[in-house]
Image (cartoon, helix red, strand yellow):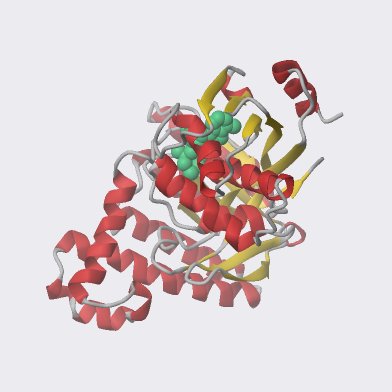
Amino acid sequence: MHPLANKFQELFASAPDIIASAPGRVNLIGEHVDFLDGFVLPFALSDVTTVAIAKNSIGKIRTSSVQRKGAISIVDCAALTPKSGEAWTRYPIGVIWSLGIDSGLDILIDGQVPLGAGLSSSAALECAVATALNELFDLGLSLSDLARAAQRAENIYVGMPCGIMDQSVSLMATEGNALLLDTKDLSIEQIPFDIAPLGLELLVIDTQVHHALVDGGYAERRASCEKAIADLNINSLRDISVADFVARKSELDEKTYLRAFHGITEMKRVLDAVTLLKAGDFVGFGEIVTAAHISLRDNYTVSCPELNLAVDTALKFGALGSRMIGGGFGGSAIALIKAKDSDLIKSEVKSAFMKERFKSPRFFSALPSAGARIID
Ligand code: ADP
Ligand code: MG
């Protein structure tokens, strides 16, 4: 029996009907453009969130998480309203709401994706639930449908105006590949990212600075990009070239200009990065990754001292490219490094953090892994 089925049995005194899992992600390039119709290039981590679910006949949703010490949170399934209930339960319950399911359910969650580290534990949780419910209720939804349902859960039920990237990659990723996703129509291309045989490694540096994306900076920056679209009277930042945008600088206030400039240049960087990856040019690819960091730091202003120190130190000790990932204000950075430099870079980042009296960082090595699946 799956270990989570045992725990489920202890907690709810019955067996789960289904067990499913979905991964967290890192994004190689294309940050803060998935709500702007941009291209993004994430891949799925081997770390997954697993959910065990059973229907119940008491008309209630009972939710529990190993990461919340197994306490059970109970809501009436006839009365699901966005932003109600305990904050962390809104992610799984939001998916139930968004899929229009009105059955009583028991849910047990166990996540390996670190919470709030910029590795999208939120999408991993949503997509595990969506995958399980699609099967359990025979909904027959496509992966794009499930991604949109999970995004709607986070946007409306949780109240976090995230784009569609995290949910898409958690559902659509395949092993050994990064996912080139066009967030306008969710069309995809799998881009091989098999770096181990080349002696390369993708190091994830978790600064252990935890953000709370739901409140604040993320939504405000997104609003700036939407303001630029309105002020310039265009349909999408995707429809304007960098040169045309720069030529119209005087039509925007400084903050709006810089934030939208990030979006427009970042969309171009993704396509350039894919061209370089296809040509096997990892040095050029690394340079674009670093350029993305500089734009996130200086134009979009979502970095923080810990992320900048992680990136600068990794680059100083040989990384081909490095940048902050995720929503920002904390969380993780990635560095494309030669595997032989791994120990050196980790110890240099660690001691640089110590010198600044920052919290000690954590390190992971990320390999492109498969998307969501039914386990049992
Ligand atoms: P990230 O997606 O980068 O990890 P978010 O703030 O978007 O950060 O999502 C993290 C939130 O998702 C947590 O604070 C919690 O509410 C919820 N969550 C994710 N995984 C779990 C889990 N295994 N158990 C309980 N809550 C979880
Ligand atoms: Mg998240």
**Is 266 placed left or right of 285 in the picture?**
left
For the C terminus, the quadrant is top right
**Is 25 placed left or right of 190 in the picture?**
left
Q: Is residue 32 above or below residue 128?
A: below
**Is 275 placed left or right of 261 in the picture?**
right
Residue visible at 67% across and 41% down in the picture: 48
Residue 63 seen in the figure: yes
**Is 323 placed left or right of 72 in the picture?**
left
Residue 375 appears in which quarter of the rendering? Answer: top right
Q: Position of residue 97 (x, y in %)?
A: 52, 43
For this orientation, the residue located farthest to the right is: 1
Q: Is residue 17 above or below residue 218?
A: above
Decide which of 41, 5 is in the foreground and name it.
5
Q: Position of residue 352 (x, y in %)?
A: 45, 35
**Total numbered circles:** 0
Residue 126 appears in which quarter of the rendering? Answer: top right
For the N terminus, the quadrant is top right
Residue visible at 33% across and 64% down in the picture: 262
Residue visible at 69% across and 37% down in the picture: 50
Q: Position of residue 295 (x, y in %)?
A: 35, 60
Decide which of 169, 235 is in the foreground and name it.
235
Residue 345 seen in the figure: no
Q: Position of residue 75 (x, y in %)?
A: 51, 26
